[in-house]
Amino acid sequence: MQFLTMIFLNNFLGGDEMKIAGFGVEAWLNQYEKSAVYDLSQSTIESLSLAEISKLTGLTLSELFGKQKLDYGWIEGSPAFKQAVAQLYQQVEPENVLQTNGATGANYLALYALLEPGDQIVAEYPSYQQLSDIPKSFGIETVYWRLDPQNNWYPDLNRLKQLITAKTKMICLNNANNPTGTLLQRDFLNEVVELAKQVNAYVLVDEVYQPLSADASFVSIVDLYEKGISTNSLSKTYSVPGIRVGWIATNDQKITDIFRKYRDYTMICAGVLNDTLAVALLNNQAKVLARNQQIVKENAEILTNWVQREDKVELKHFPAIPFAFPKFEINGDIETFCVKLLQETGVLLVPGNRFAILNHVRLGYCTDKATLKKGLQLLSEYLLNY
């Protein structure tokens, strides 16, 4: 109630406008991605077409959509959607899954529903900017838990112990991390959970970059902690960012009911056609993931071989996610480099300064192979002469 009153006073009674910083990576992509010839900036695995989805699922478009009425459909997501998502976790029941407009909608919902001025959050940094700047715009004290570049961008638990206080309401993480690719291991997350328990804090984890690897290095926060909140979507691992379907999942009915109330103020539904596609993909996830694992494996080999030939590029091991975060040994500003690279070669990267990191770029390597190979070739030539 306190939070809603603050919004009312600010927006309708002439108070100071709540301010938020520009979204660095999104502003960059909005400005440049449509002019790219060789787009190596994206953080998803090569997007599926409707024809490919039809082939993967064995369903024609008429069978998928022909009899679907274009009403609101299931507001929280269809029962089939909730059931399919719940099966991705060990500790989540279908009724504790809520459909959202992508993971961005899920993150916003969690932050909007659970935080009030006077609270404090500890936010992994750098990370997906939404997770720190939205709370800050709400008047939440935001404390940064910085990743350590000297430790391959892994955060320090001792530092977290110093940052947490009795005011800490939430710890915000991104696993795997965007842009560094840092993958937080199960033992590490268990330590985070134990620290969160000491102050009864939530742990919100954006898990859209669940790695496509055969090992057991990834675990969802909701399978470790009763106050864990998982946000995810079909945009990255499942290659359909265009349908804008995500979800928020918990293992606690009371938390989910809070989200239900606030969700009514942020969205109605994700759309019945989108829900239909989401269910079809989740019901055929083995085929989708097999396709994407192959793309990640083959394209990662191309990228790794390229890095080994480049004297001006440093890239340590990266998990099986759709992007890497190499360091470029260049003189001058990394954004200037990326703008000129695009203008002169048509190759698009995301400069690291858009995540407040110098001399690095986010390189999305899970595009089609022709684009990747030609883009890397042009990047090599540009680096050589820059």
Image: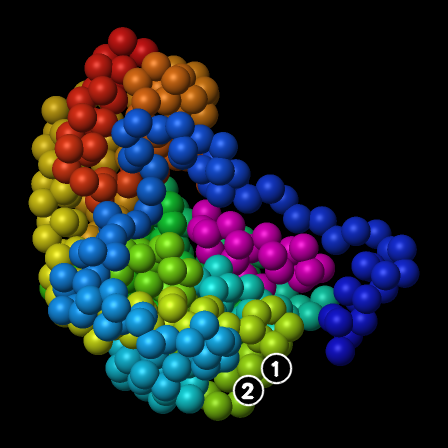
| Position of the N terminus by quadrant | bottom right
Query: What residue type is disc 2 on?
Result: Asp
Q: Residue at x 25, y 65 (%)?
A: 61
Residue 349 in the image: above or below residue 128: above
Residue 255 in the image: above or below residue 25: below
* Magenta-colored span: 121-141
- Tag on residue 59? none
In the shown orientation, is residue 225 left or right of residue 266?
left
- Tag on residue 261? 1
Estimate how packed mark 1 is, as few (under 14), some (14 to 19) or many (20 or more) residues with alpha carbons within 10 Å: few
Q: Residue at x 52, y 38 (%)?
A: 27
The secondary structure type at the circle numbered 1 is helix
Query: What residue type is disc 1 on?
Result: Lys
Q: Residue at x 31, y 57 (%)?
A: 240
Residue 353: give x, y in percent of width and height.
47, 33
The image shows a total of numbered marks equal to 2
Estimate how packed mark 2 is, as few (under 14), some (14 to 19) or many (20 or more) residues with alpha carbons within 10 Å: some
Which residue is denoted by mark 2 in the rendering?
257
Q: Nearer the viewer, residue 338 or 225?
A: 338
Residue at the far right in the pictured view: 13
| Position of the C terminus by quadrant | top left
Q: Residue at x 22, y 44 (%)?
A: 366
Residue 188 in the image: above or below residue 346: below
Observer able to see residue 144: yes
Q: Nearer the viewer, residue 53 or 309?
A: 53
Residue 217 in the image: above or below residue 99: above
Residue 218: give x, y in percent of width and height.
25, 66
What is the spatial separation of the Cα atoms under label 2 and label 1, in whole angstroms?
6 Å
Residue 376: give x, y in percent of width and height.
20, 27
Residue 225, magenta (yes or no): no
